[in-house]
Image (cartoon, rainbow, N blue to C red):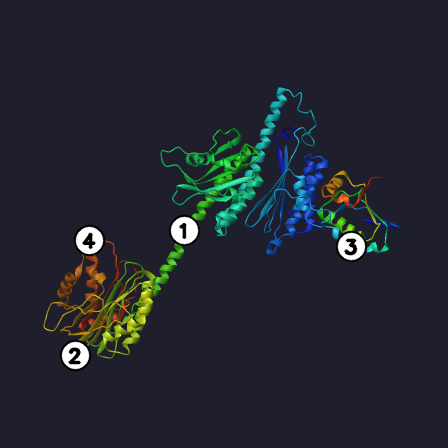
Amino acid sequence: MKIENQGQCLSISEIPELTAVNSANFRDEVRAVLPGSPSVIEIDLSQTRFVDSSGLGALFALYRATAQRNGVILRLLNPRPEIQQLLELTQMQQLFEIVRR
Amino acid sequence: MSTLQLARHATLRLVFAPDLSSARAAAATIRRFLAEQGVPEKELFSYELCVAEAAYNAIAHAEGAARELAPVAEALFTSDQVELRVTDHTAGFILPERLPPPPPLAEHGRGLFIIQSAMDEVRYLRGTKENILIMRKRRRANQPPIAGGEPGSNRNLSLEESRQQLTESESVRAGLAGELSFRSETLSAIFRCCAELGRSDVLAEDFGQRLLVDLFHLTTADWCVLRLLSHDGRALVVAAASEPELNLGPLTLPLAGEEPHGIVATVAMTQTAARFDLREDSDHNEPLRTIGPEATGLVCPLVFGGTLVGTLAVGRRDGGFPLGKLQDEVVRVFAEFLAIQTVNLRHHKEEVRNRMFARELEIAQEIQHLLLPRTLPQLEGFGLAGGWQSAREVGGDFYDALAVDVQSLFLMVADVMGKGVPAALFAATMRGLLRGLAARSDDPAEILGGLNRLLYAELSAVNMFITAQVVHVDLQTRQMTAASAGHCPLLYVPPGRHNVVALATQGLPIGVLPDTVYRSATARLGDPATLLLYTDGLTDTRNTEGKLFGQRRLMGWLSANAIAGHTANELRDRLATELNRFRGSAEMDDDQAFLLLTEARAGEVRAAESGRQRFQFQRGSFLFPANS
């Protein structure tokens, strides 16, 4: 997993999977860089092959941690179709901007 | 192998360590397995996800020692369906029909919702030790069959090629059947081992459930009902079922000459396995319809040594039970093992019961040991002998003799109404009390009165009573004082007479009224002295013609034998022989006890010295204490 801080944008990428096994770790690492007050958080899911309910839970935790700060944009980049389906199924797409580029 | 594609199904079973990484790895392995079967990439994600979610739940909800138990993940691939199963060791949960989507702001609780959304059918089978979550997804029929099978490869085959493929497919199938039989053999070895260790003592629960899991796995079934023949052999009772709603009532078997109704009854009566498909069965009263209108499957008889033990019915609700040699073989092998197992188990239970019964008898006999005097007091110039025989292994009759001093003694005989261990326990209590009371009074009437006061409450509480005869004998004066609590008279030879007379005293049995007053009667013993105390089991002895031995016959016998000058031991042996001779082969239906006092002769001393007999507990034979 790679975390880059590009000014106001916090970019998280190279996540092979987000599951019960690594979601706690993901949460902790992202939380550690939140005090930098980014205005955009981009999670690049293009390399992510698998997400389970714990992974969704970790994404949700991130949403909650940033929800108090007005104006923070949460963006999920290029999720695979099956993962996008999962996000839609669980109505998580309401919380995130899903962006393809 | 390519020719087998359409008929093929493949299974994978993974037992994984109870931690999240292993659960995750199991889900990934199942994905790879399904990919190998040609399941398209876009479907694989949801299968992997469902296994992962179910596996996490299996770990997260396990409690206590069950946390150490390994969950199982299975995948079952057929050309028209993917079935995933996860076996957990949790307390289980109630699976709702259809979960609503959790609110987007909820952090947890998406797992089951995801599974139900991704799969066509989700079932949760709850067992006593483990549960199985079954998840099914039908595959579209027009999908290209399997990886490796090039589309169109079956076209344009020559007849010869088709034949060859058919032969190949048959041999592969036979190989698979062999492999599965071998696996069943292994299971049977485990079962047998379990039975030998006495671990599978609850057939209906542990064993039945374990069996179901294995049977499901091997046959791709989704329901199963094991019925065992009831003890009276007239009905088949459900011993194990895959779901509680299949735990139906007993199935009464037809009597001789009646037509069996229904598939299971027919299988039981003909002892022949039968396949069934309810979609083609016109009988609307078929009992198997409770499983589902489209159920298909196989019913096998459980037969051991030509005798019906039960039935095993197995199949699928959705009509998809594969009717192949393979299934036939596996279910038949299971049914065979189950029959053996059931018979083994019954033998085992019987053995345990017999062992327990034998132990109970041992205890009862130990009580009886305590009840009868091990030795009888021997007073200068007189002989004393007692005999006892019980209709059962333990009884309520007893006798006792207690030396007061060098010239006087107490003799007593009692009969506790009732038989078996409770009677023996009262007898033991009474014997102790008698000994205590005799130490404080020389008057038998007083002793019986005291005994009644002490025992009344206990005896009346259980509606029991005791008849007893207590005699104090002064050997010097030949004076005897007797009192009776509802007991039969004592017999003796008065001075100057040769024939026996009865001394009957009145008195209520002990335990009838709280404050009965007893009266003593006195009499003198003749020379030589002959005295017999007995219980009514002697006079009530019946022979094969139903005739009673009776008091008259007993008196006649004693008169004849007393004058013959036998020692106490000789007389006792003769009386025992006489009673048994009279009874012949008739059932003994009451306990017998007696106590004999005679005047000692020269030979008596020798008999006493050599007379240290051991107790012999045998039904229908008299038991004698040693002389001391």
The answer to whether residue B26 is visible is no
Query: Where is residue B154 shown, x and y percent of the image?
Result: 66, 24
The amino acid on which the numbered mark 2 sits, given as a three-letter code, is Thr
Q: CA distance from mark 2 to mark 3?
A: 109 Å
Say which of marks 2 and 3 sits in front.
3
Quarter-of-image position of residue B249: top left
Q: Is residue B307 left or right of residue A96?
A: left
Q: CA distance from mark 1 to mark 4?
A: 36 Å
Q: Earlier in the sequence, mark 4 or mark 2?
A: 2
Query: Where is residue B365 shown, x and y percent of the image?
Result: 34, 62
* Residue under disc 2 on the same chain as residue under disc 3: no
Mark 1 nearby-residue class (10 Å; few <14, some 14–19, many ≥20): few
The amino acid on which the numbered mark 3 sits, given as a three-letter code, is Asp
Q: Quadrant of the N terminus of chain B?
A: top right
Residue beneath disc 3 = A28
Q: CA distance from mark 1 to mark 2?
A: 61 Å
Quarter-of-image position of residue B528: bottom left
Disc sitting over residue B350 in the figure:
1
Say which of marks 4 and 2 sits in front.
4
In this rendered view, identify the residue nearer to me: B494 or B141: B141
Residue beneath disc 2 = B477
Residue beneath disc 4 = B546
